[in-house]
Image (cartoon, rainbow, N blue to C red):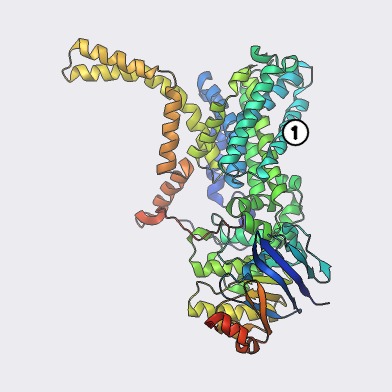
Amino acid sequence: MSFFTVDSISLQFGGLKAVDKVSFSVEKGEIFTIIGPNGAGKTSIFNLISRLYDPTSGKLFFEGRDITEVPAHQIAKLGIARTFQNIELFENATMLANLLVGRHCHATTQLWQEILFLPSVRRAEKEHRRKVEEVIEFLDLQAYREKLIAGLPYGVRKVVEVARALCSEPKLILLDEPSSGLNVEETDDMSFWIRDIRTELGVTVLMVEHDMTLVNRVSDRVLALNYGKVLASGTPAEVQAHPDVIAAYLGA
Amino acid sequence: MRFVFKTDYDQDIRLLKHSGYWWSYGVLLAALIAFPYLVGSYLQSQIVFVFIYAIVGVALIILTGFTGQASLGHAAFLAIGAYTAGFLQSQGISFIVYFPAAAIITGAVGAMVGFPALRLSGIYLVIATIAFAFIVEEILARWESVTHGNEGMRVRTLDFLGQPVPRDGDAFYFLCLLVLVGSILLALNLLRSPTGRAFIAIRDSETAAKSMGIDLAGYKVKSFAISAALTGMAGVLFAHKMSFISPEMFTLLLSIEFIMVIIIGGAFGVHGAVLGAIFIVMVDPFLTALKDDVPVLGASLASSLGMSSEGSGKLRDTMSAIGSAAGLKGAIYGLIIMMFILFEPYGLYGRWLKVKLFFQLFPLYKKATFKRQKTYVKSERNR
C-alpha cells in the first residue's frame, strides 16, 4: 500500500459536488502537486485530509491506517502538518510562540505540572525550543524570533507558516499555495525550500499550486482537477500536454 | 536602552528576565509588604479589594485575554466561591479545606459552563454566560436551606488553624496578597508552557489550532475551569472581606466591573489585571469625592465669575442633583469603557508600555510606532 492514499473521496455541499470521487496516492519522499482552475476543489481536498471537513463518501489512508474518522486535532500527531492558503498564523503572538505551537502535538506535560512549572516542564520546553531553533535555522528566520506576526510582511508570514508546520516534525506536509502572493525572488526561495524539505528532512510534500514554473521545477507528479473531478495525472509535462487540462485552462 | 545578550534558552523561559526585573519587582514587593504599616485602615481595606478584583482580573485574562472566550458570568463564579465558603464554614469545616474546595467546586461549574463555549462564540457566548449568571443568582435566592435566600448569609471571621484572621487585619491583607501572587504565577507559568500557547492559538485561529493538534473542546473547557477556579478563590476572600453575602451583591453589574478591569487594565498581559483592579476599586471613592466637591467648586467658580449668589446656589443644587442621580455610576462606567476601547484598546498596561518605550528610545521615538491598522488577510471560512 502506498504511503498516503485517497480512495474515491467525495465532498458534497448540498447539491454542489466540491470533490467528486477523487482517488490518488502519494509515495514516500515524493513531491506531489494538485493543480486546477479556481474552484476545482483543491483546497477542499486539503481540508478533507486535515479532517476539517467530513467526506460524504470515500476513505483516506495514511501509512496503511484508515484516518477517515480521526478527529482533526489528532492528525498532526499522526504526522500530517499543513499550511493555509490565506495564512492562519496566530497574529498576536511572537513568531517563536507560533512555532512552539507547532510543537504542540509532541507536548507531554500535564496541566498541573505546567501550573507549577516543574523541572520536567522546563526540560520539555527546552527540548521544544531546540527543535524550533533547528527549523528557524533551516528556513533562515533568525531575524524574526521575537517579532509579532501582525508586524511581519506577507512573504515572511508565508515562510513562518511552513516553519510552524515543520515544527511538528511531520512525515507528510500539505502546502496550500506556498507561492501565492510572493514575488519572483521569494518564489525561487520557496522552491528551493520545498525541495530541501523533501531531500534534507525526508518529508513527503503534497502541494496545491498555481504557479506552473514552480510546479514544473519541484514536482515529481501532478494531479489536475476541475469541477471536483480528476482530469489527468502523471509527470508535470504529461499533465500539461493532456488535452482535457488544456481545455480546462484555455477553453476547448 | 538595555540590550540582553542571549546565550541560553533558559533566558527566554525565566520569568525575571534580567536584573531590571529583580529591582522593580523587588521594590514593588517590599512596598506591598510595608503598606499595612504605612497606610490607614481605609486605604488598606481598599487595597485588599484591589487584590480580590485583581485575582478575578487574572482569571478573566486567562479566559478572555488568552483564550478569547468572553464571559459576563464571573460574578456568578465569585458567588459560588463565596457561598461555598460561607456554607462549609457554617458546617464547621476548616479554612484549609473549604478554600481549595471552593476552588474545585467553582472550577467544576466553570467546566460545565465551558461546554456551550464549544459551539458558541463572540456575542452568543456572552449571552450564554449572562444566562448562567442569572440562573446562579436565582438559585442563590431560592435554595434557602443552604444560602438563606434573599436574607443573605453571615460569614464568620476567617479561622486559620485556630488563629482568627479578622477581615481588616494585616494577616488578611497578606493572605489576599499571597493568593494574588499565586494566581499571577499560575497565569505566567501557563503562558510559558504548551497549555497557555494552546489558549493563545485558539484565540487567534481556531482552524490553525486544530490542525496543529490542539483539542479545541478540551482546552476551552480547561480555560473555563481554571478561570472559574481562580474566581472561586477570590470569592472565598470576598465573602470573608464582606462578612455578609447576599444574592444581590453578585449581579450583572459586578460582572461588568470585572470585564472593565481587563478592558481598562489591558487584556493581553497579566499586568493589566492589577492595573485595572486599581482603577476600578479606586474610581468609586474618587467619584464619591467628586460628588461632594464639584458642586461647591462649580458654584464658587461661578460666583467669582460674577454670577449672583442666587444663581450660583441654583447651579450648586443642579450639579449635586446630577451627581446623586441614580444610575450615574453605570453611565460613567459605560463612558470609561467606551473611551478605553476607542482610544486605548490595550488598556493602561498598553499605555504604560508605550510610555516606557518612549523613554527607552528617547529622542528617537516615532509617533507612528503604535499607529493602528486593520488587516484583512484572515479567513473566517473554516470557523
Residue B93 at x, y percent in the picture = 79, 20
User: How many numbered marks have been drawn onto this rendered protein structure?
Assistant: 1
Toward which corner of the image does residue B301 lie, by quadrant? top left
Residue B260 at x, y percent in the picture = 51, 34
Q: Circle 1 sits in a helix, a strand or a loop, which is it?
A: helix
Residue at (52, 40) in percent of width and height:
B272
Residue A64 in view (yes/no): yes
Residue at (68, 71) in percent of width and height:
A173
Q: Is residue B124 above or below residue A182?
A: above
Quadrant (top left/top right/bottom left/bottom right) for the C terminus of chain B: bottom right
Residue at (44, 22) in percent of width and height:
B327
Q: Is residue B211 above or below residue A22?
A: above
Observer-nearest of B262 and B219: B219
Q: Amino acid at mark 1?
A: Ile
Residue B40 in view (yes/no): no
Locate residue B222 relative to residue B309 in the image: left or right: right
User: What residue does disc 1 label?
Assistant: B104
